[in-house]
Amino acid sequence: SLKKSVSLPYQPHPLEHQWTFWFDNPSAKSKQASWGSSLRSIFTFSTIEEFWSVYNNIHHPSKLAVGADFHCFKDKIEPKWEDPICANGGKWSVTLSKGKSDTFWLNTLLALIGEQFDHGDEICGAVVSVRARQEKIAIWTKNASNETAQVSIGKQWKEFLDYNETIGFIFHDDAKKDRNAKNRYSV
Amino acid sequence: HDSDGNANTAKKYSRDFLLKFSEQFSNLPEGFVITSDIAEALSVNVSHPADLDSY
């Protein structure tokens, strides 16, 4: 009976959604190039096994060049303000000191693909941004004005990350008009 | 198959469950194409990305 069980074909574990990893490569950027023109999709995965196969072969945030953005968004949603599903959305952000985002990033990804959020249908994806003095992780959501859903997502995210500082939610609409847009919600 | 995110039908996996698989899948998935513009994002050694497009 042992032999039989060994010969059974392996069944991968399907995820609720397909997700796509995207990479924005700062070295390919020129001043003339418009924002997002160096954005490249890396791979779309739909099982736990595929997730690890990719994750284990990509750089974790601490190894990425300054300026790089790494995204994980639901399939068919582009990580851009202009994407029709993101257009009315916003984002929660966590700011971390240099080299500290790897574990937070992984725990964010696992919470997303494992559908741990009560309002997971509100989520577009997540992005980690590596900058000269800090690293930032954000979760993008669909309907910024749905306060109940956003506050629930923000609170749960902090629990999953075991992060105790206050985090803020910014509407994409505000961010477009003002680089220093104010938080609409905080938890 | 098109879920609206209904919590009762979602395929939920805890962090601990997902982590059980982390060591078992170390090779890039089948069909993964390493192009020069994403090579920088990969931790695998890529000396000539273009040569590896048939990986």
Image (cartoon, helix red, strand yellow):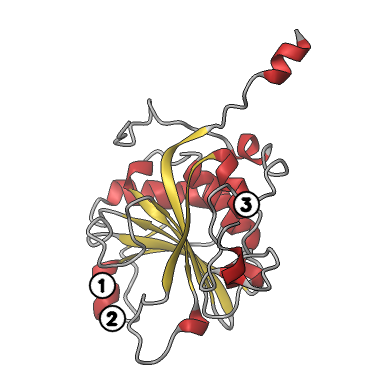
- Picture coordinates of residue A40 (x, y %)? 43, 67
Question: Badge 3 sits on which subunit?
Answer: B
In the rendered image, the residue lying farthest to the top is A1
Is residue B4 or residue A29 the one in the foreground? A29
Q: Are marks 2 and 1 on the same chain?
A: yes
Above or below, comparing residue A75 to residue B21 in the picture: below
Separation of marks 3 and 1 at Cα, in angstroms:
39 Å
**Kind of residue sitting beneath label 3:** Leu
Above or below, comparing residue A70 to residue A19 in the picture: below
> Of the numbered discs in the image, which one, if any, rests on residue B28?
3
**Kind of residue sitting beneath label 1:** Asp
Per the image, label 1 sits on a secondary structure element best described as helix
- Picture coordinates of residue B37 (x, y %)? 51, 73
> Of the numbered discs in the image, which one, if any, rests on residue A174?
1
Above or below, comparing residue A177 to residue A99 in the picture: below
Q: Considering the image in quadrants, where does the C terminus of chain A appear? A: bottom left
